[in-house]
Image (spheres, rainbow, N blue to C red):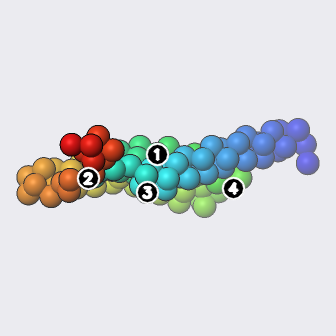
Amino acid sequence: MNLITILIQIVAYVFFIIGSYFLLSTAVGMIRFPDLYTRLHAGSKCLIAGGISVLIGCILVEGISFDSLKLIIMLTFLLLTNPIATHVIVRLSTNFDLVSETISENDIDK
């Protein structure tokens, strides 16, 4: 293995670690956040960042091949569909008043 291959592997693993952090924060945000809007924010923003990082790491590991092209297509699909799906869910929830009220610590005192 030459130096460039080792550097590409290190950069790929850094992308994997960053992506894992964002995907873990997505899961924690979906559990911990109180209402629909903040959960969708965590689900869309962190999932995009985590997905991009993991897919870029996979592309770096694969090198230039047909599999990398497939990963780039998956990345493009993720970038196009996730914001649209989040927008549709928020739009429908506001149109049909589907936002559930959550109890926070300030509401308990009242």
Point out which mark residue 31 bears: 3
Q: Amino acid at mark 3?
A: Ile
| Discs 3, 2 touching: Cβ within 8 Å | no
Mark 1, mark 2: which one is toward the viewer? 2
In the image, taking residue 52 as reference, residue 8 lies left or right, namely right
Callout 3 secondary element: helix
Around disc 1, counting alpha carbons within 10 Å, would you say few (fewer than 14), some (14 to 19), or many (20 or more)? many
Q: Is residue 53 visible?
A: yes
Mark with earlier residue (4, 2): 4
| x 15%, y 58%: residue | 98
Q: Nearer the viewer, residue 72 or 45?
A: 45
Q: Amino acid at mark 1?
A: Cys
Which of the image's four quarters has the C terminus?
Answer: top left
User: What residue did someone put label 2 on?
Assistant: 102
In the image, taking residue 109 as reference, residue 4 lies left or right, namely right
Mark with earlier residue (3, 4): 3
| x 91%, y 48%: residue | 1
Q: Amino acid at mark 2?
A: Thr
Q: CA distance from mark 1 to mark 4?
A: 24 Å
- Quarter of the image where one finds residue 8: top right
User: What residue did someone put label 1 on?
Assistant: 46
Mark with earlier residue (1, 4): 1
| x 84%, y 43%: residue | 6
In the image, taking residue 13 as reference, residue 97 lies left or right, namely left
Q: Amino acid at mark 4?
A: Glu
Give x and y (percent) for residue 75: 48, 52
User: What residue did someone put label 4 on?
Assistant: 62
In the image, taking residue 44 as reference, residue 103 lies left or right, namely left
Mark with earlier residue (1, 2): 1
